[in-house]
Image (cartoon, grey):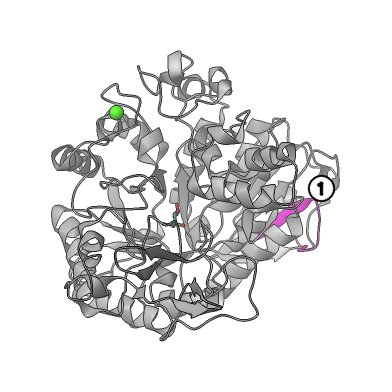
């Protein structure tokens, strides 16, 4: 935040620690495992690691319910081994970002335990405690908002005879950021990690941290996310972020990226537009992840390429020259991308195409563990085997209208758990993730899909990621070029161009396995360029075009 712009050239590797690598043989991924894999991470050609939460947590939401912000979960290690990871990363030129989850804490956090003692507790006002309403002789919650994970947004507390607000799970009470003391706590958390040497934060649902005064009822009452407009992107979010920047971040050479569900590029620009008013370096968009669903992965639709392209182009163009994008197609909150936007029949081809498709856009690429080897969705045989609180909640709601077999299919397609199965390192026992029985199911395809096998194979997806990351780094046009899309309505090809200082990069991505003719856009002579990346051999050009092979990718560089 201190003015330098190294973040524009970096690529980030995301670790979801529980499933990355088990170093001490208890079946749970941990920081000892990360230590063993630092060379591997470096070998990818990335520049930084973002750790999903490593803090103590009762794991109601696997780490996103934090019970102590200044320590490490004993499952993952301790502060000492964290410091070793940090040093090891820094020695290799890798920066380290922490997940900052301050919209809510765990209900097992000391602040919440104290706040539960009543209005005289200094922590009472750290959360949203409110009396219920009585209507028709029955106790009702203070307003009609719904939580994003579990029923209503309010939980009644017997001892207090009051309700507390939770926008996510019951065990994730929302912090009251309007309370200046809470903001001081956040600043202390930031300083704690920055002083240790951490290089920045991914800020969890940061656009939800301010709630409308009076917490009004929301009408018309929506079946899901009711109340959203009273807790999303409220004006004070900006003020609080500016305060964090002024009091903390400006004193460090660090990076921040905010997570912002349902945010438009116009709204994002409030926070990330370059200049003195910028309060975050980047914002995590969601709309491109909705090309096969409505608002949430749990409302499935057939994949719609035009919708996906529109979302990418909108963010590219609206931020162009004004702000920097965060680019991703996978993280711990979505099923695996090859299973969604690509094809399990053509995992390597579609995996390579998808990688180039998003990483050659303008912005900072994020790569989620396992994405680089093309890990696919898990398909567990029963709903009960899924662990994620959001999945279980969605399954409960879906069961009201769908037969059980359909609900299972939905869960198999859409669950976040699909991205949370243990990392597939080798074809040995437990995919080389652990000596002991892993905490969660290993995908049965680990004998085919694993790091060890792909490392040796020059044509593997893993080695393509390495090539691609190196290419992006070495080509200013890939880093800084302007973005322009061709044929936005085309239902088979995604075609875009980047241009910078006389150089042009043309990215051609075929979605689907149909053999369809591609004709170069007007004014572009494919044979006058160099084919710099592709996912097939023998890339002939016939009459300034070609007929696409399944999920074909071609990237041409023009230097005139
Ligand atoms: C973010 C996280 C997600 C978590 C939620 C609540 O969306 O990425 O994993 O469940 O916030 O903290
Ligand atoms: Ca372990």
Q: Is residue 321 magenta?
A: no
Query: What residue is disc 1 on?
Result: 545
Q: Nearer the viewer, residue 423 or 152?
A: 152
* Quadrant placement of the N terminus: bottom left
- Callout 1 secondary element: strand
Residues in magenta, as a range:
487-496
Q: x%, y% of residue 135?
A: 53, 79
Residue 322, above or below 59? below
Q: x%, y% of residue 377?
A: 60, 35
Left or right, 471 with reference to 251: right
Magenta stretch, main secondary structure, is loop
Give me the residue at 52% from left, 32% from top.
373
User: Which image quadrant shows ligand 1?
Assistant: bottom left
Residue 326, above or below 242? above
Q: Is residue 494 magenta?
A: yes
Q: Nearer the viewer, residue 25 or 200?
A: 25
Left or right, 500 with reference to 101: right
Mark yes or no: residue 82 visible.
yes
Q: x%, y% of residue 313?
A: 64, 65
The residue at the far front in this view is 137
Q: x%, y% of residue 91?
A: 20, 41
């Amino acid at each position: 935040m201190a003015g330098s712009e190294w973040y524009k050239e970096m690529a980030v590797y995301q670790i979801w620690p529980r499933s990355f690598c088990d170093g001490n043989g208890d079946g749970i991924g941990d920081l000892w495992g990360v230590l063993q894999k630092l060379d591997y991470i470096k070998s990818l050609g990335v520049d930084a690691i973002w750790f999903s939460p490593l803090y103590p947590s009762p794991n109601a939401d696997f780490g996103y319910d934090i019970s102590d912000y200044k320590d490490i979960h004993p499952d993952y290690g301790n502060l000492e081994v964290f410091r070793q990871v940090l040093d090891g990363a820094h020695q290799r030129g890798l920066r380290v970002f922490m997940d900052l989850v301050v919209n809510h804490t765990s209900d097992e956090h000391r602040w919440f335990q104290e706040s539960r003692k009543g209005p005289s507790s200094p922590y009472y006002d750290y959360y949203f405690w409110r009396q219920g309403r009585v209507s028709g002789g029955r106790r009702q919650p203070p307003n009609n908002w719904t939580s994003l994970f579990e029923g209503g947004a309010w939980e009644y507390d017997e001892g207090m005879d009051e309700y507390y607000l939770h926008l996510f799970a019951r065990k994730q009470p929302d912090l009251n950021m309007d309370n200046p003391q809470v903001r001081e706590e956040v600043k202390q958390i930031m300083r704690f990690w920055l002083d240790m040497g951490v290089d920045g934060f991914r800020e969890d649902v940061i656009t939800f941290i301010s709630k409308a005064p009076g917490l009004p009822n929301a009408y018309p009452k929506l079946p899901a996310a009711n109340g959203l407009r009273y807790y999303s992107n409220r004006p004070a979010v900006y003020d609080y972020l500016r305060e964090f920047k002024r009091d903390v971040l400006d004193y460090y050479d660090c990076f921040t990226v905010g997570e912002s569900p349902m945010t438009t590029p116009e709204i994002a620009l409030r926070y990330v537009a370059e200049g003195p008013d910028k309060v975050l370096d980047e914002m995590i968009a969601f709309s491109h992840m909705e090309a096969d669903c409505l608002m949430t992965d749990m409302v499935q639709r057939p994949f719609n390429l035009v919708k996906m392209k529109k979302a990418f182009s909108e963010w590219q163009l609206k931020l162009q020259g004004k702000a920097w994008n965060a680019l991703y197609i996978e993280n711990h909150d979505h099923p695996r991308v090859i299973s969604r936007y690509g094809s399990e029949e053509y995992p390597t081809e579609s995996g390579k195409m998808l990688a180039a498709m998003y990483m050659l856009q303008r912005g900072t690429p994020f790569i989620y563990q396992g994405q680089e080897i093309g890990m696919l969705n898990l398909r567990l045989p029963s709903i009960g085997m899924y662990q994620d609180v959001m999945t279980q909640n969605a399954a409960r709601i879906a069961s009201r209208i769908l037969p059980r077999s359909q609900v299972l299919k939905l869960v198999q397609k859409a669950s976040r758990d699909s991205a949370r199965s243990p990392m597939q390192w080798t074809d040995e026992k437990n995919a080389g993730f652990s000596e002991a029985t892993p905490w969660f199911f290993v995908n049965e395809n680990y004998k085919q899909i694993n790091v060890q096998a792909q490392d040796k194979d020059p044509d593997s997806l893993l080695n393509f990621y390495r090539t691609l990351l190196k290419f992006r780094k070495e080509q200013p046009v890939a880093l800084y070029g302007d973005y322009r899309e061709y044929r936005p309505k085309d239902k088979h090809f995604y075609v875009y161009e980047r241009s910078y200082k006389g150089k042009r990069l043309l990215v051609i991505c075929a979605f689907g396995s149909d053999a369809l003719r591609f004709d170069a856009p007007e004014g572009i002579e494919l044979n006058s360029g160099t084919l710099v990346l592709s996912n097939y051999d023998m890339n002939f050009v016939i009459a300034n075009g070609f007929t696409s092979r399944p999920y074909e990718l071609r990237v041409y560089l023009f230097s005139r």
